[in-house]
Image (cartoon, rainbow, N blue to C red):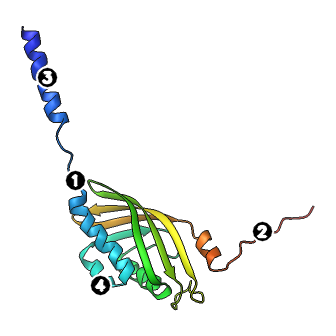
């Protein structure tokens, strides 16, 4: 009888703890994430002060990495100076306790004065990013994307390196 009673208690405990609803981390983090994406669309970089940690780091290609909030503001300003008609869509979103991972798509027109501008051509691109949060702010971002397809859309041609003749 003791064995059956112990099994009942153990099973009740396992069922009750295993059936608890997992916390919805997106409730806290998604508004911060949405504001961050909105700044990329609008270029209103002053809004970053409320959502970016002072020790922020952005890891991306050489032209869009940032080691501080001020550098991030410059990256976004350059982006908005290069592209008009920006549409940035978060295609997939996964939130955990202090992290976001997702896939995004971007379309825009190169009508601005930035270093990548090119005669009003439309471009599209996709990428994947991971964003880390701390104390309600974004502290780090990893952004991965391939610029070659976008450069081809702008008319650049990839030329293989010359081979040595022996």
Name which of mark 1 and mark 4 comes first in the sequence.
1
Residue 42 lies, in percent from the top left, at 36, 83
Q: Classify mark 2: helix, strand or loop.
A: loop
Q: Quadrant of the N terminus?
A: top left
Residue 24 is labelled as 1
Neighbor class of circle 3 (other Cα within 10 Å; few <14, some 14-19, many 20+) is few
| CB within 8 Å, label 2 to label 4 | no
The answer to whether 153 appears left or right of 96 in the picture is right
Q: Classify mark 4: helix, strand or loop.
A: helix
Residue 92, quarter of the rendered image: bottom left
Q: Classify mark 3: helix, strand or loop.
A: helix
Position above or below: 113 against 138: below
| CB within 8 Å, label 1 to label 4 | no
Residue 161 is labelled as 2
Give the residue displayed 16% in from the left and 35% down from the top. Answer: 17
Which residue is identified by label 4? 46
Give the residue displayed 13% in from the left and 17% down from the top. Answer: 7
Measure the alpha-carbon separation of dots 1 and 2.
Answer: 51 Å
Residue 90 lies, in percent from the top left, at 39, 66
Name which of mark 2 and mark 3 comes first in the sequence.
3
């Amino acid at each position: 009888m003791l064995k059956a009673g112990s099994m009942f208690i153990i099973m009740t405990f396992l069922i009750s703890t295993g059936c608890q609803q997992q916390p919805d981390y997106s409730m806290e983090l998604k508004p911060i994430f949405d504001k961050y994406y909105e700044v990329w669309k609008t270029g209103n970089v002053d809004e970053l002060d409320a959502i970016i940690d002072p020790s922020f780091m952005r890891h991306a290609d050489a032209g869009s990495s940032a080691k501080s909030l001020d550098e991030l503001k410059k990256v976004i300003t350059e982006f908005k100076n290069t592209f008009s008609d920006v549409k940035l869509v978060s295609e997939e979103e996964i939130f955990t306790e202090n992290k976001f991972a997702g896939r995004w798509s971007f379309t825009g027109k190169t009508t601005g004065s930035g270093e990548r501008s090119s005669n009003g051509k439309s471009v599209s691109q996709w990428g994947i990013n991971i964003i880390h949060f701390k104390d309600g702010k974004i502290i780090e971002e990893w952004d991965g994307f391939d610029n070659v397809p976008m450069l081809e859309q702008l008319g650049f041609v990839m030329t293989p390196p010359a081979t040595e003749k022996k």
